[in-house]
Amino acid sequence: MAKKVLIVGGVAGGASTAARLRRMDETIDIIMFERGKYISFANCGLPYYIGGTIEERKALLLQTPEAMKERFNIDVRVENEVVAIHKEDKYLEVKDLKTGETYKEHYDTLVLSPGSTPIKPPIPGIEKDNIFSLWNIPDTDAIKAYVDNQDIKTATVIGGGFIGIEMAENLYDLGYQVNLVEMANQVMAPVDYDMSQLIHGHIASKGVHLYLENGVESFEEENGSTYVKLQDGTMLQSDMVILSIGIRPNGELAKEAGLETNKRGGIVVNEYLRTSDEHIYALGDAIEVVDYVNGEKTMIPLAGPANKQGRIVANNIVGRQEAYKGTQGTSIAKVFDLSVAATGNNEKNLNRLGKVYGKDYMMTVVQPKSHAGYYPGAIPMTIKLMFDLEGKVLGAGIVGYDGVDKRIDVIATLMRMGGTIHDLKELELAYAPPFSSAKDPVNMAGFTAENILRGDMEPIIWSEIEQADQDKSILLDVRDKIELDLGYIEGAKHIPVNDLRQRMHELDKEKEILIYCAVGIRGYIAARLLNQHGYKVKNLIGGYNFYKCVIK
Amino acid sequence: MAKKVLIVGGVAGGASTAARLRRMDETIDIIMFERGKYISFANCGLPYYIGGTIEERKALLLQTPEAMKERFNIDVRVENEVVAIHKEDKYLEVKDLKTGETYKEHYDTLVLSPGSTPIKPPIPGIEKDNIFSLWNIPDTDAIKAYVDNQDIKTATVIGGGFIGIEMAENLYDLGYQVNLVEMANQVMAPVDYDMSQLIHGHIASKGVHLYLENGVESFEEENGSTYVKLQDGTMLQSDMVILSIGIRPNGELAKEAGLETNKRGGIVVNEYLRTSDEHIYALGDAIEVVDYVNGEKTMIPLAGPANKQGRIVANNIVGRQEAYKGTQGTSIAKVFDLSVAATGNNEKNLNRLGKVYGKDYMMTVVQPKSHAGYYPGAIPMTIKLMFDLEGKVLGAGIVGYDGVDKRIDVIATLMRMGGTIHDLKELELAYAPPFSSAKDPVNMAGFTAENILRGDMEPIIWSEIEQADQDKSILLDVRDKIELDLGYIEGAKHIPVNDLRQRMHELDKEKEILIYCAVGIRGYIAARLLNQHGYKVKNLIGGYNFYKCVIK
Ligand SMILES: Cc1cc2nc3c(=O)[nH]c(=O)nc-3n(C[C@H](O)[C@H](O)[C@H](O)COP(=O)(O)OP(=O)(O)OC[C@H]3O[C@@H](n4cnc5c(N)ncnc54)[C@H](O)[C@@H]3O)c2cc1C
Ligand SMILES: Cc1cc2nc3c(=O)[nH]c(=O)nc-3n(C[C@H](O)[C@H](O)[C@H](O)COP(=O)(O)OP(=O)(O)OC[C@H]3O[C@@H](n4cnc5c(N)ncnc54)[C@H](O)[C@@H]3O)c2cc1C
Ligand SMILES: CC(C)(COP(=O)(O)OP(=O)(O)OC[C@H]1O[C@@H](n2cnc3c(N)ncnc32)[C@H](O)[C@@H]1OP(=O)(O)O)[C@@H](O)C(=O)NCCC(=O)NCCS
Ligand SMILES: CC(C)(COP(=O)(O)OP(=O)(O)OC[C@H]1O[C@@H](n2cnc3c(N)ncnc32)[C@H](O)[C@@H]1OP(=O)(O)O)[C@@H](O)C(=O)NCCC(=O)NCCS
């Protein structure tokens, strides 16, 4: 068993490993190296400190080296950078950044949790001192000092991932005019394009200028002002810029030591989080993990997995063998008033793996309310759920306000347990009017998914409507008359669902009837009715509301 | 297959069956009988309409007979009471309450969803017209008219179940002085006594007078005032009284027809929700169900199960065989600012089944924050989790503020899928600071449960502290000095956890050290430390905070 354990990295993965290790074994020598000045800080809280939601800087520092010593008897060495691993002789070369001196430290077991680093591509002008990345406490201090001391009116955030969006929101909270620039056709990659359209609308409604499918060409200086020049020529005057376009794993140390790494530089580990060297474990952002849903190798840099891997690594070191079963990618972000969450595989993932809609997987979109509609404050959320043809749930994305986090966690739990849409519909969840409905939103996703899978409701999705052959199909709007004022799909015939039994003879049985209502329920009822009377029907998944948001 | 289906009861179970049945089959004749004036009303919203949270009466009426006819072609007969079932000849005797006439209606298949009725025991004075039960729209109208038109200052609610508590809260919202009387030693039976103590404190803090272990002896009239006389002689002057002491299933009709019923009058059904007669199905509050966790027969009257059973009954009627797998008892109530939730079996259930703590099941109590502590608004919740010695989760109760509903739903989902505490600790839930922590509260419950089960943390529970042999044990308080001002357990020695490595020699190795901190984490760290140095230790589950609430 390990006598001396060295840990590289003193934040999410590293500190968690150290704490658990000590709880499991009083006798081990534990040394934790951190090249930064701080350990155990709340990475995820940094944007909110800049925006002022978190008021106290010290709230970000969850542990100090002194307290780690007192409570856990851990030798924490901040401003000590591990510069080389000598795995044959089992020692590290460490540089004390305060003195500049380098020393050796032997280990029985080594743990690598070096995290990742924000990407800073060689864009002309990127070295300007009003262009920031946000990753750690010094970054935060720099940005905070800048926003506190400069007269800022405009800020541009580059990158629409969750950190970029959180920063956009926090800079907006400071009263700035904010631009958000994203190279892809959508922000928040964990959800699909259709779902992201709900987010785009919301961001725009806040007055944030969103530039999609547009990269940064250069940072220019004109008349004492910084301009972000986009690929399409747009010039965004910006008093400050936040760069948040992605990260790369800190795998160099491992690679240089001859440990196996993957193409993206991630450290390769087995299910016990052991690297290709049996005395070295690795965890956190720096490692390659197994996608829990599809079994493929991937990289998913999130705090929950890093923390839990820390506990597992510690267990394995003390001989309590425990496997890490993979990462599901459950994630969430507050996007202004919206909550955006995902778990498992989205359609983009599935398609990348060669899976085809309708053949390998199906999907449902429902828009149930956060709680009983008759109790004040109920607001709809949009749930998109992917499942395979056996009913196994593959992934979900949710965009909404209240209660999004609950539903994604329930679905994530179900998926972790290998659940199907049939399980989803049966879930017995807590219902009282302030919290949910007798049929919870996730039950609704389950019911509709089952109806699709059993062929009780033939679905048509937003992208298929445009392609429908107008000669062979009829678009049928079954909403109430008054709802037509909110817009409708061009060319649709209108018969309200409640009149359909009387008026169905107006429809041509030879044609395929493409039905829609606002969210899909009445369309489904209409579809069942017509179907049983011998009509060929399809129901628009997500209804007109979803269609209208996606097709803008 | 069924040609004519008659449904008795037009609310949660009945109306859900009817709607699904029509969606599945356009050709069936469906007649739904409801003895009341209203169908498809929001039972669960009634208290909130009385208190004014729900402003519009019409919000309570989710469907009308007319709309059910238009949309679903269902013949809805309100104010029609089914008075007899002639199962041999397959017809009903129905009394039209408007005309007083009785008629026959034949069926191929019959569905019983008659619900339940509030118990009104023969307490002297119970017929006074300011004593109300709350069960349906007419009850609601009566109470609403009374509170709107009378000058009420004091109200007494009898019964501390969820309807009683919701009414207490809503009457309090109207500005009344409210008394809450409960025969048992706790309110909110779905959680255990220890958890209920957290609720009692909260209710009292609102100025509501709580009378526990005290029944009503009589209702007296003195000087034009009504008094509720309790068994201990207390007289509660009450301008109005709400009686909410329990319900009984409406099983008489079934029993008189010779269908199998249980001791409590509940209708016995098989897994397909079919009664002892193959042409008759039953569902909702009136039926006996299987407890999903322990497999025993029970009665669990809740809206979620009734709604889902409706869908299953309809499926079975149209020949799509589907089993109802049992009820888990997942439930929640808003209790003033608190949320109180439960799923599965509590300790009372387990003990009733002969299960013994420590032998058949174990438990953990954790008090994690609703979301990351450094993000504003994080509030602790108390989670009590029961699990068997193989780790299978048996039940949970949660009391707290924000995020209680989410955690009970996650645990309910895990339990539905047969999950263990090991699964619980691995759940990958959505984390960003406004929503959760990198280790979610339910993960924490999983970690601590595993530590208990593996023997890494020997637990002691609040009720065992008093019984500890003072000669053979030492109580050790490992909190910081300043926390002693908040109270401590008499006779405890004080060594802060961070000083323990230096000062452990002060402790007697021959004695058992009973450790506590505020919630249990530092106690656990101290216990691990001492244990590895050869001390016999136990850690107080839930810590001093929980102990102090329970032992008052
Ligand atoms: C602004 C921001 C917001 C975030 N929000 C969320 C969120 O809401 N939800 C979520 O799940 N995740 C979020 N994350 C991601 C999450 O913080 C990371 O996934 C997690 O911290 C990874 O843990 P780790 O131990 O791998 O790396 P880190 O926590 O980054 O720790 C690695 C440490 O290793 C040190 N190090 C590296 N190399 C060496 C060396 N050679 N010698 C010594 N020390 C070294 C680094 O200085 C660093 O401090 C966020 C991250 C950031 C930056
Ligand atoms: C005030 C209140 C609050 C509640 N809050 C919640 C909550 O927050 N969460 C939750 O899960 N549950 C709650 N419930 C319970 C939930 O409403 C019931 O479990 C559910 O309605 C049961 O459905 P059911 O179809 O069995 O009975 P019901 O919905 O009660 O319907 C039965 C109907 O059958 C009719 N009927 C009976 N006999 C006959 C006959 N012979 N002929 C014709 N008609 C007949 C009755 O008049 C009644 O309308 C609450 C109930 C009440 C009253
Ligand atoms: C109002 C009432 C008749 C509605 O019954 P219902 O039509 O079965 O239920 P809903 O309106 O919730 O709709 C659910 C149906 O819509 C479908 N659906 C939901 N969202 C959909 C969408 N976006 N697209 C397509 N279909 C959708 C579901 O699949 C389900 O159909 P299925 O059962 O055939 O699969 C019944 O719930 C009722 O009487 N409720 C009041 C009484 C009550 O429940 N009280 C207790 C709680 S307060
Ligand atoms: C601060 C830090 C060192 C704490 O690590 P930790 O001690 O393992 O974790 P926690 O403080 O959450 O405590 C969890 C432990 O307490 C135990 N515990 C929790 N509640 C308990 C209770 N009521 N009774 C007994 N034990 C309890 C758990 O079982 C667990 O112990 P185990 O792992 O041995 O089973 C580490 O989380 C860290 O550095 N975090 C900051 C960085 C970070 O995570 N960033 C990303 C997110 S912003």
Image (cartoon, coloured by chain):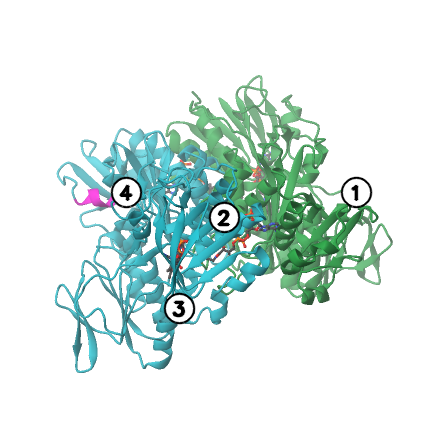
Chain colours: A green, B cyan
The stretch of residues the image draws in magenta is B461-466
Q: Which mark is residue B4?
A: 2
Location of mark 3 (residue):
B99
Location of mark 4 (residue):
B349
How many numbered discs sit on the rendered protein?
Answer: 4
- Position of residue A417 relative to residue B481, above or below, is above
Q: Chain of mark 4?
A: B
Q: Amino acid at mark 3?
A: Thr
> Is the residue at mark 3 in contact range of ligand 2, meaning its CB lies under 8 Å from it?
no
Q: Amino acid at mark 2?
A: Lys
Comparing B259 with B175, the one in front is B259
Q: Is residue B413 visible?
A: yes
Query: Do marks 3 and 1 share a subunit?
Result: no
- Left or right for B72, reference A152: left
Residue B130 position in % (x across, y down): 27, 74
Name the N-terminal-most of marks 4 and 2. 2
Q: Chain of mark 3?
A: B
Label 1 element class: loop
Choose mark 4 or mark 3, whichever is in front.
3
Q: Amino acid at mark 1?
A: Pro
Name the N-terminal-most of marks 4 and 3. 3
Crowd class of label 1 (few under 14; some 14 to 19; many from 20; radius 10 Å): few
Residue A247 position in % (x across, y down): 67, 40
- Left or right for B453, reference A50: left
Identify the main secondary structure in magenta.
Answer: helix
How far apart are labels 3 and 2 at the CA level? 25 Å
How far apart are labels 4 and 1 at the CA level? 65 Å
Location of mark 1 (residue):
A122
How far apart are labels 4 and 3 at the CA level? 48 Å
